Image (cartoon, grey):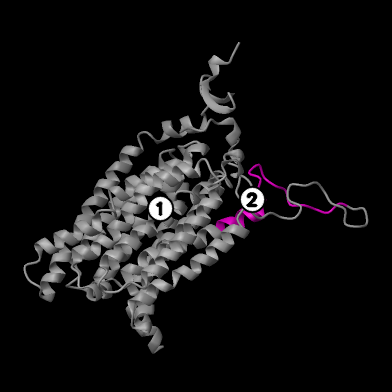
Amino acid sequence: MLDVSADTTPFFSDDNEGEGPTDNGVGSPQPEEEESASGVSDRRAKVTVIVLCYINLLNYMDRFTVAGVLPDIEQFFSISDGKSGLLQTVFICSYMFLAPLFGYLGDRCNRKSIMCVGIFFWSLVTLASSFIGKEHFWALLLTRGLVGVGEASYSTIAPTIIADLFVKETRTNMLSIFYFAIPVGSGMGYIVGSKVNDVAGDWHWALRVTPGLGLLAVFLLFFVVQEPKRGAIEAHPEHTLHRTSWMTDIKALCRNVIFGIITVVTGILGVASGVQASKKLRTRTSRADPLVCAAGLLLAAPFLYLSIMFAQASTVATYVFIFLGETFLSMNWAVVADMLLYVVIPTRRSTAEAFQIVLSHLLGDAISPYLIGVVSDSIKKSDSYMWEFRSLQMSLLLCSFVAVVGGAFFLATALFIEQDRHLAENYVPSDDAPIIVPKRGRSTKVPVSSVLI
């Protein structure tokens, strides 16, 4: 059981952290690094971000390793496009439905403990999934669902730790670094999965790469990361707020992994350009963040459409349009995370991250792989190569339409962002908010007014 009272207690700390000057043996004081209001030194805070970035990168590597070997999985289990799409759907459904639970726990319990247990569990389940035989596709679905348990425990919590270590522009910069791991990890997962499969001649080995790296992540998290005090760096310490309920060979390699490379490069460019565009636009309007996100999606839509339509006519043109489309799509990752964190008070951020994960995946990748697979199967009139290509091409056009809808929603968000940010920054607990008082040896919540004289 997780210890609620220990949520700011580090598992690992510097020998003299938090203590006064020590004697070096000749009477002169030993210089110390100044500790911030979060209770974590600046050096330790930066190391924490590095560790969290490594785990986030590993998180997305694991998620997209399956994509890199999906054709082999379909052949091994003799399944259709629709059934292979279920692998992602089951994972995302588990991920999003468990996110609220971990969001709840993340706002009330030791966040490092939750992440350690979750990452260890996810690593074991991923390793177990690499030993499944061809008669047990249901077991692969089950293990992908269980992987979602571990990932939900990390994704809902890690951004809130960064939020409790940095503020303002520094926080935005650190979040942008953290979210670089999404496109880089996704591309690396695709590359690693496909290349390990090529070398080993068995797709099962592709799923045996990330578990070992996951155990290293647990070690780093346990011994290096120090949990900060919630909200203290923003002058909103948690004790003042009421808790409410990741030559030839080279040429051949590049040809095999060009899509993964594009994803890595465009992800980096997109995240960086999104953050920079937001910073520049903030000097002109406080609605800069949702406007940048809207622009990214609306600009991505036509390039995604063109990449799909040119897929048969020109490979070069297709890659160019994919490059542009993915760059614009990646613009909103860090910006959206920053928006979410600054419109929510510190003690509710893990829960907010959880709900954001639920809604974004519920309306996105939870149903999209299966939906696109089903649409493809329904359009397909024969098992010929051309019909397989054409049916998937037509079904993927749905993505461009959804990008436009997403852009429209971000434009609507721009109408309310100022007010929501103001309310979060100026939040003051109600005079009649419930407080905890003893009642016959147990704690109970009562209104403040009922205990005032």
**Residue at 32% across, 55% down:** 92
Tell me where residue 184 appears, x and y as whole percent. 43, 65
**Residue at 52% across, 25% down:** 445
Q: Does 404 appear above or below 432?
A: below
Tell me where residue 146 appears, x and y as whole percent. 37, 58
Pick the front one: 13 or 33: 13
The quarter holding residue 143 reads: bottom left
Is 444 left or right of 398, judged from the image as shown?
A: right
The quarter holding residue 73 reads: bottom left
Q: Is residue 43 magenta?
A: yes
Nearest-to-viewer mark from 2 and 1: 2
Q: Is residue 262 visible?
A: no
Most extreme residue toward the top is 453
**Residue at 42% across, 33% down:** 420
Element at label 1: helix
**Residue at 82% across, 49% down:** 21
Is 37 left or right of 113, judged from the image as shown?
A: right
Label 2, label 1: how many angstroms apart (C-alpha)?
29 Å
Q: Does 97 appear above or below 85?
A: above
Q: Identify residue for label 2.
A: 10
Q: Identify residue for label 1.
A: 333
Q: Amino acid at mark 2?
A: Pro
Q: Which residues are magenta?
A: 29-50
Pick the front one: 420 or 270: 420
